[in-house]
């Protein structure tokens, strides 16, 4: 979170960037604007303060998904598949330790891609062992004798193995737990770590944007600033060759847990941001979590709205997975 006044002071400049940058990105050799690419991505993890505000133990067991979270994920996948499109899920390796993973197998068999979200929901930018994950801060012996880089590499590798072994799938990309305002731009070593493990794209960047005070609905100025931030959420290539597919603000956790918006405000933000992307042939990557949405949006209105907006845009937009977005950057 950044200071609201500082951010709004830059809104005019960002709005100019929002007008020019994505259009330049989206133009092909024939100088015609390509269809907007809209992604629905759901991170399969437990969220602190859900389903009730007094719950913080999930920080230590992010992958121990409860029954309601699984049900929401399955129903979201079904609703979207019925409309002929797919959700891009990201799963934790530790979830594969649960006795029954048939619900996730069902999602995979329906054609929804499932990516790597690490094994324990680790912070890939950690510089101290205790900052890697709450679990390791409480139980440091689990990573004793290993460097931070070794812990991160093994956590990513184990998630791959868990998903492949339990589900028999090809893991579809990598998303960092948490989003970073600069992505992993400052960390060429983390970029190379992912490349070495076979990844050609990552979803790690979550652009800075202002937030309202908890319990206060956003005004037009704040919503406009979030729309302007979409210019910073467009895919690009790092100098290492790794492609970044950013997450688009505002996430469900940011809107509901941090700012405690009403659902209608969240839906309005989605509407404005996707309209912006469609008008410019740009990218919008909806970031949400079933563990949060099942409380804040039990009727799937967010996901239905996204599908409706893209349907109404006809050939000016399409719902795609992050691999498809990364492929456009490669091309």
Image: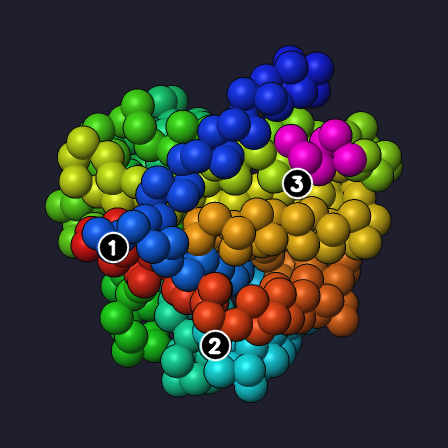
Query: Residue 293: percent from the left, percent from the top?
Result: 69, 60
The residues bearing labels 1 and 3 have C-alpha atoms spaced at a distance of 39 Å
Left or right position of 226 against 245 = right
Q: Which residue is mark 1?
A: 30
Left or right position of 97 against 193 = right
**Residue 82, can we see it?**
yes
Specify the quadrant of the image occupied by residue 15. Answer: top right
The answer to whether the residue labelled 3 contacts the one labelled 2, judged by CB atoms less than 8 Å apart, is no
The answer to whether the residue labelled 1 contacts the one labelled 3, judged by CB atoms less than 8 Å apart, is no
Specify the label residue 254 is tagged with.
Answer: 3
Say if 176 sits above or below 11 in the image: below
Labels 3, 2: front one: 2
Q: Secondary structure at mark 2?
A: loop
Labels 1, 3: front one: 1
Q: Disc 3 or 2, which lies upstream in sequence?
A: 2
Q: Disc 1 or 2, which lies upstream in sequence?
A: 1
Q: Quadrant of the N terminus?
A: top right
**Residue 101, can we see it?**
no
Q: Which residues are magenta?
A: 220-225
The residue sitting at 34% across, 43% down in the picture is 25
The residue sitting at 25% across, 55% down in the picture is 30
244 or 89, which lies in front?
244
Say if 28 sits above or below 109 in the image: above
The residue sitting at 48% across, 64% down in the picture is 317
Classed neighbour count for the residue bearing mark 3: other residues with Cα under 10 Å, few (<14), some (14–19), many (≥20): some
Q: Which residue is mark 2?
A: 85
């Amino acid at each position: 979170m950044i200071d609201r006044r500082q951010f709004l002071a830059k809104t005019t400049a960002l709005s100019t960037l929002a007008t020019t940058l994505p259009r330049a990105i989206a133009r092909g050799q024939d100088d015609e604007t390509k269809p907007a690419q809209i992604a629905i991505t759901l991170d399969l993890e437990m969220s602190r303060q859900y389903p009730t505000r007094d719950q913080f133990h999930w920080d230590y067991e992010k992958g121990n998904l409860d029954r309601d979270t699984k049900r929401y994920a399955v129903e979201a996948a079904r609703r979207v598949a019925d409309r002929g499109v797919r959700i891009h899920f990201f799963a934790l390796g530790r979830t594969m330790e649960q006795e029954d993973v048939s619900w996730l197998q069902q999602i995979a068999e329906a054609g929804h891609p499932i990516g790597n979200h690490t094994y324990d929901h680790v912070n890939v930018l950690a510089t101290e062992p205790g900052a890697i994950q709450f679990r390791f801060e409480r139980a440091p012996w689990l990573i004793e004798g290993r460097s931070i880089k070794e812990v991160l590499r093994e956590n990513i590798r184990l998630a791959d193995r868990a998903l492949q072994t339990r589900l028999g799938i090809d893991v579809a990309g990598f998303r960092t737990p948490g989003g970073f305002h600069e992505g992993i731009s400052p960390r060429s070593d983390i970029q190379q770590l992912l490349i070495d493990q076979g990844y050609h794209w990552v979803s790690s960047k979550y652009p800075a944007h202002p937030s309202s005070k908890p319990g206060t609905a956003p005004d037009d100025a704040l919503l406009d600033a979030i729309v302007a931030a979409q210019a910073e959420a467009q895919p690009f290539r790092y100098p290492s060759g790794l492609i970044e597919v950013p997450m688009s603000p505002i996430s469900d956790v940011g809107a509901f847990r941090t700012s405690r918006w009403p659902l209608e405000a969240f839906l309005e933000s989605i509407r404005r941001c996707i309209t912006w992307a469609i008008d410019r042939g740009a990218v919008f990557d909806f970031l949400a979590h079933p563990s949060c949405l099942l409380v804040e949006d039990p009727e799937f209105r967010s996901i239905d709205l996204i599908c409706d907006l893209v349907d109404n845009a006809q050939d000016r937009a399409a719902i795609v997975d992050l691999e498809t977005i990364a492929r456009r950057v490669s091309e």
